[in-house]
Amino acid sequence: MLLPLVFLSSCAAPKSVQISDYIDTDVAFKENFRLLQLTDIHWSVNTDPIKQGAYLSKVVEITNPDFIMITGDLLLGATTSTAETLINTISGWNKPFGITWGNHDREGEYSPTWLSNLVSNAKNSHYHELNDDVFGRSNYVISLMNKTTGKAAWNIYSIDSNSYPASSTGLYYDYDVIHDDQVDWFNKVADYSATQNGYTVPGLAYFHIPLWQWMYSYLQNQKGLMGEILESSTYSMAPTELKQKFVAAGLPLKFWPGYKDTHFFDAGVSKGVKGFFCGHDHSNDWGGTYSTTSGQSAYVGYGVKSGTELYYTHGSNTRGYLRDYDIIGGSLSTLHGDGTFDLTHYYVQNDAAYTTYTEEVSAL
Amino acid sequence: MKLTQRTLFLILEALLFVICSAVFFTFISSVGNLIGASDSPLKRMLPYYLSVVGAIYLLFVSHIALFPTNEKKLQKTLKINGIILAAWGLLSAVLIVIYVANHTYSSFIMGMVSSLFPLDYFLLDLLVMAVGAFFAYQGFRFPKGAERTYFPYEHSLTRKIFASIFRPLYVLVALYFTGAFFFCVGIANYGSSTWWCMLSLWLLMGVPGATLFYHEFFYKNGKDHPREQSLKIALCALLGSAFFVFYFLIAILVKRNFIVEDATALFTIDFMKSWNLVPFAATFEAILPPAIAYLSLFISIRKGKKPTNVAAEKPTEETAVK
């Protein structure tokens, strides 16, 4: 019966945190900066770490990134051994990396604190978790610094899209969203960055669960700019408002977003975010643009599921041509000094030769 | 079998239960990922699954050997199940060796399921094999007419069939919750503001294991209980379980999201499917057995029938000691 005492004794009050504490300025920007998004790696107790580790290493080798952002669900039903092996594999690439958590990462045989410490203390990690009052854990910014000017060229925003909100029925969980206080935090940190640098720093935002703007964009233009919506089932428990929009359009709802529309997209675009990237729906690699009410637009899109763990899918022909390869690999953004970026999806096949297909969109 | 020996065997059975609970808890995560996988890892995980099944099978056989209904069945159980267990453990251990030899597993300590996998499961296989061989040896060199305690089942066939289905299911669920109970100590979200809610769930998850522990060590293993005494015991168990269930329900009503905050690690399959069912299953697992025992005894006393249910399973003067 010592557990309650331990629980009590370890209750700690949040420390005072400055907004500057959230910003990491250790990564240098260079023209054509290569930012790789890996997502939904999903290592578990069943994972063959050698095979899957070799695959992920190959994706990194092929894409040759300057920074790696992993958008959640690295783990599901994993042991400490599996988690350590994965983080050691990622550290071993000798590339700076950040992580934003998915809804499944905490579902393993470890405490959230243990996992955070593992990632925070890993070599090459730029994961940042402060003892603050902001909802979620992976809220931080990597400012890519122009060493010549001493100013930030780009901001990479990691925002925790959390996991599950309180269930309205008590029996079923929706997916959570980026909370209002996180949007407030984002506004503050983006404003602080703008003040420090003297201009609105262009940014890319990374999180796990898609915003409703993915669906709004898809409803406007199903082809989008790249990729496909290939989830095999429809989200029958989706929020009614969304379901009605898809029914009205005669389209199946094959997105798994959070339970409500948030202000984050508008806030992000108004603060210079050019692209929003998520994971979560393994079989979707689609992306398109969407505009705010004020007419500013930004790219919203899925990454490419990294590896074959849990479920993945094969390409289809909904873009007007047959994508005859597995939708696995990584998504590379190439950042330019003028505030634009190019996006390339790398579909690295799980065969002996790691045969690779690419799809690209320029000047976003 | 002397009392000291018997107590020792019961302690070993309890230790095996704890090991199986940890093994089964991880096994459920593995199965969850197996069900949802595009590329099935079943072939690669086969030795692991064989080890888990072998360990749990050993637990069930140990229970049957410790609480036999009669001499004939005890001998049969020891012989047949002993041979199967020994063969099962051997097969699983050999498979692990083959997998290491052909590099399906990179080494004997490759990690994955645990940091010592597959060595730890290889040793578990050896244990299953050794105990199986011991059981088989005891079965074949069975001294008939020796002094032993028996626990004859005296209910109807229908009830026996129901019991033979639901009791193993209860034990499997109890294994999972006991595993979660122990893992929770290591993986709890210490410092959480909802610690008192988590405490309710933690205590609730401990109830099935504690119920089985009491049943094996003190109730079924003890002296014969008169129906009235059994009724009191059932009532105490029911009230105790009801308290834990009530505490948990209050916690989940006050802090509806505390399971997401603090306990996602414990219910992997629930969260894979976005369900919130397992914590409520824990309430049924805690409350149903004492409720059924109490009602059964209450009705039998009201009707003035012979002792029923658990009380009737006590060793009687005629059957207990031969």
Image (tube, rainbow, N blue to C red):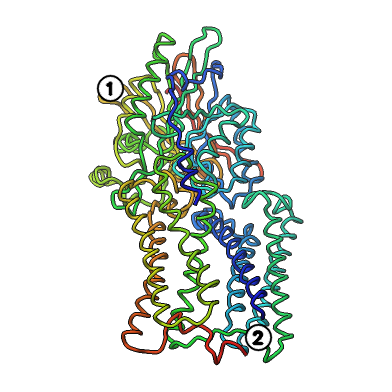
Please name the residue shown 46% across and 58% down the image: B205
Q: Is residue A334 visible?
A: yes
Secondary structure of the residue carrying tag 2 is: helix
Instruction: For marks 1 and 2, give the one nearer the viewer.
Output: 2
Percent from the top left, x then y, of residue A52?
Answer: 62, 44
In the image, farthest residue toward the right: B101
Give amino acid for label 2: Gln
Q: Is residue A120 above or below residue A147?
A: below
Q: Position of residue B169 (x, y in %)?
A: 48, 70
Of residues A19 and B66, the one nearer the viewer is B66
> Quick check: marks 1 and 2 in contact, CB under 8 Å?
no
Vertical position of residue A186 compared to residue A218: above or below = above
Name which residue lies at 71% across and 57% down. Answer: B99
Decide which of A150, A184 is in the foreground and name it: A184
Q: Chain of mark 1?
A: A
The reply to whether residue A325 is in sight is no
Specify the subunit that label 2 lies on: B
Which numbered tag is attached to residue A295? 1
Residue matched to label 2: B75
| Image: B42 above or below B254 | below
Would you say B300 lies left or right of B136 here?
A: left
Q: Position of residue A342 (x, y in %)?
A: 48, 24
Q: Quadrant of residue B61?
A: bottom right
Vertical comparison of B226 with A333: above or below = below
Q: Quadrant of residue B133?
A: bottom right
Q: Secondary structure at mark 1?
A: loop
Q: Residues within 10 Å of mark 2 (few under 14, many from 20)?
A: many
* Quarter of the C terminus of chain B within the rendering: bottom right
What kind of residue is marked 1? Gly
